Amino acid sequence: MMLTALALALTALAAPPAPASTPSHALQPLQKEELDRDAFMDRYRRALDARAESEIENLVRRNQGTATVLIIELCEANGREPSERLENEIEGLRKAWKIAFNSSFANEMYEYLSLMRQQVRAFRSEKKQDFIKIQRELQAGTAEKNWERVDVACEQFAALAEAFSQAGDHYYVSECWWRIAQAYDEGVRGNKANLEKAGEGFANCVEARDRIDLKDRFYSAAKLRADQLLGSKEREAERSEKAAAEGFTRKKAGASLGPEVGYDLTFSILEDIENPLRPGFELLELPIIWRQLSFKRPGSATDFYTFGDKGPQMIRTSGGVAMDADRDGKGEVEITLTGNIEATEVTLGEGDSLRKWGFLSIVLTDSEVYQGIGLPMQPSDAFMSLFVGPAGSMVGEVDGTSIQVIDENMDGVYGSTPVGWGNPGLTPQSVQPIFDTIVVGGAKRAVPWSEYIELGSQWYQLLSDQNGTRVVASKAQLETGTLKLSAKGIKPLYFVVRGTGTFQYSYFDVMTGGSRGIDVPAGSYELLIGEVRKGKRKQVQKAMILSGKGTDTWTVNPGETTTIEIGAPFDVDFDVTDGGGVVKVTGGTIAIVGSAKERYERLWNCTLEPEAFVRKAGTKKGGRGVKMDTVRDYESIQNEGLQIAWFPLDIELKKRTDDEEVEVQLIEKKNKLFGKLESSWRKAGGN
């Protein structure tokens, strides 16, 4: 069908790898494993025939991208030739989408595409053909690094976005701007990027998706990158208001830079993922939560996930796995499967971009416990999983201070900026940033790779060149203040903040300074990521700390100390929907919220198991609590995916009458990591 072909075109520029010879500051879009169209439709139709509404909701929630494309495809088909079958299929998706995401996107697409005037339909069909042609031009220009050709394609996409806007199709408006933004950003152009145009493109993409209430993974990635490049006006206003209220005399942050000096680095492979201690959720000897490469029978191949289809391939052989770095179909480096963690060194790139790289890998040879559930992980003739972790690093000195730069996000570039991933255990629209780290002066603890960094007693602007095989440093004269953390009821292992403006590519782990705090450039900061952890390895209990809607920001004035206050008292955030005689709590939307509106997600070995209470809105007493169950069997994970193991299952609570307005509260008497948790009362669709 036409849309299926177009959907493939839409993803073609979705995740371009960073250029081999230039550093990348671009936040790469999320990657999520989803069912393909045919597999989705097969499961969806069977669930629809069985009237299994909960199964449909879970299917849509876990396959948002596929569901998006199918909603558009089915609504288009129904607009051309309406039928009862199409109406039923669309209605099932509309209902499930609303419950899964509390979004009107599916309804808006139905109204727009099903009720479209014939003249507009013909015009839109013509523009979709133009979209595919321009997409091909953009791909060709990007592959050739012919930036004039890319510029022309971007101009054509901008005109096409205007045409789609006139037709009222804001979905394709957003897709046009996404491609423009990607094409101008550093992930495609490296040091020839036009960051202003990239930022405007991402912002336009966000605006168009806002108009159709489509806050999907691309929306999140575009918004994050737009904020990085342009700054968030809303956040800046919040910072200014807060600074004025607290009596800050704010100065524009800046830095005076000395001459650039280059320093060559040499490759060093890391064989221990826990030494040095590095900030990262997967950076511990627990392979079951590492990234997974899946193979079928010997001879099958899969892309190394961080490079997409432009980087190395992994080939399953009769005795193990081989890496095919140049994608010629032949593996250059053999990985022996011993059942132990093995470090592998390979060569990537060619010419000036040639460099060493490394990763850890293991094939699990026995059953493993995943969120308390036993999973059979032994390889078979038909299927095998290889779990991989970062191990590549570059070592050297900058002005007499030793450094080690570690490629934690495994993009083959030493010293790139965070990559966003949609990993199991995250609520909808949440993103896990994964960033490179640097060990300074032989320290036992790594810190985030940062454009502005203190080496010894001197501040520098530090940039990676040639994929990080060389760094360029400039001494920086700047004003600093102190940032420290006060966490109530929890003990974070790390707490990473990101600067704004001049320091938007600067990242600092506040926990490295202990109770005293750390010195940072004067300016404004926001939460990037943190982690609460208790125990070790297989017994570890942990949760990720992420920024959410309304999360505090912090201003640091020269010579002054700013304290970040997080933790207790905790609230619990969740979605509630009203289904007439019942209200439904969606388990996959539950997250703990702290005093700074920070979010605690990806709860490992401490999954929430709250009781749900319902009461008439405005009253003081609720009814008897109903326990929210969790998955306890392998078959559920096999059928529904890993995501289901991180959350309590959905629950429906009865109302006394269909039209009664009620509120819901969640209470967990004693969580393994957070203790007692009690949410505020929430109305259906409320905040």
Image: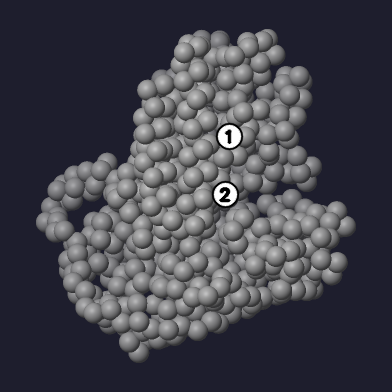
**Mark 2 or 1 closer to N-term?**
1
In the picture, the quarter occupied by the C terminus is top left
Distance from disc 2 to disc 1, alpha carbons, whole Å, reads: 19 Å
Crowd band around label 1 with a 10 angstrom C-alpha radius: few (<14), some (14–19), many (20+): some
In the picture, the quarter occupied by the N terminus is top right
Left or right, 361 with reference to 621: right
* 70 up-or-down from 324: above or below: above
Which numbered tag is attached to residue 6?
A: 1
Residue mark closest to the camera, 2 vs 1: 1
Image location of residue 87, percent across then percent down: 64, 13
SS assignment at label 1: helix
Residue name at image x 47 percent, y 52 percent: 141
Q: Look at the image and tell me whether residue 365 can be seen.
A: yes
Q: Nearer the viewer, residue 305 or 369?
A: 305
SS assignment at label 2: loop
Image location of residue 413, percent across then percent down: 49, 68
Q: Look at the image and tell me whether residue 625 can be seen.
A: no
Image location of residue 31, percent across then percent down: 57, 49
Left or right, 576 with reference to 480: right
Left or right, 510 with reference to 389: left
Left or right, 613 with reference to 146: right
Which numbered tag is attached to residue 487?
A: none
Which numbered tag is attached to residue 31?
A: 2
* 197 up-or-down from 190: above or below: above
